[in-house]
């Protein structure tokens, strides 16, 4: 499942339960911004979701302590390069073809 923001996780959990009931082997959630407020980490930890991948646009240290399924991708290099390219009036399309993100 892919979304731009994950905060209230009830819809993700319900969808994951339905997917599991219908034979899904692995369930992943990918979101650009992982707000994960309130008891969202606990709900995710107890859900059939195997892994939640978010970027570091929002800190997740506390949430990761509450849910071992949360993985964070560092996009600071991508954002820095985007700012540099905008400042220098360079093409942004380069970023979509040539910048890799490492663990």
Image (cartoon, rainbow, N blue to C red):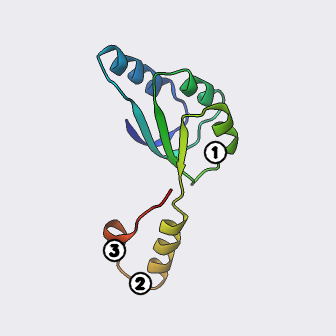
Please state the horizontal and vertical placement of residue 76, each as a whole percent of the image. Answer: 55, 64
Image point 41% across, 18% down: which residue? 17
Image point 32% across, 72% down: which residue? 93
Mark 2, secondary structure of its residue? loop
Residue bearing the label numbered 1: 60
Residue bearing the label numbered 3: 94
Depicted 35 relative to depicted 41: above or below: below
Depicted 91 relative to depicted 66: above or below: below
Please state the horizontal and vertical placement of residue 39, each as a whole percent of the image. Answer: 64, 26
For residue 12, which numbered disc appears in the image? none
Of labels 1 and 3, earlier in sequence is: 1
Residue bearing the label numbered 2: 89
Query: Total label count?
Result: 3
Please rate how many residues cluster around mark 3, counting C-alpha atoms within 10 Å: few if below 14, some from 14 to 19, many from 20: few
Please state the horizontal and vertical placement of residue 23, each as a whole percent of the image. Answer: 29, 18
Q: Nearer the viewer, residue 73 or 36?
A: 73
**How far apart, in angstroms, are the residues tagged by discs 2 and 1?**
33 Å
**How far apart, in angstroms, are the residues tagged by discs 2 and 3?**
12 Å
**How far apart, in angstroms, are the residues tagged by discs 1 and 3?**
29 Å
**Label pair 1/3, CB-CB below 8 angstroms:** no
Of labels 2 and 1, earlier in sequence is: 1
Of labels 2 and 3, earlier in sequence is: 2
Please rate how many residues cluster around mark 2, counting C-alpha atoms within 10 Å: few if below 14, some from 14 to 19, many from 20: few
Please rate how many residues cluster around mark 1, counting C-alpha atoms within 10 Å: few if below 14, some from 14 to 19, many from 20: some
Image point 54% across, 30% down: which residue? 8
């Amino acid at each position: 499942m892919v979304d731009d923001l994950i905060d209230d996780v009830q819809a993700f959990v319900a969808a994951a339960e339905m997917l599991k009931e219908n034979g899904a082997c692995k369930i992943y959630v990918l979101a650009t911004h992982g707000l994960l407020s309130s008891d969202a980490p606990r709900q995710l930890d107890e859900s059939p979701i195997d892994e939640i991948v978010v970027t570091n646009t929002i800190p997740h240290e506390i949430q990761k302590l509450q849910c071992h399924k949360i993985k964070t991708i560092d996009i600071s290099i991508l954002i820095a390069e985007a700012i540099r390219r905008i400042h220098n009036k360079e093409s942004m399309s380069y970023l979509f073809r040539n910048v890799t993100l490492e663990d």
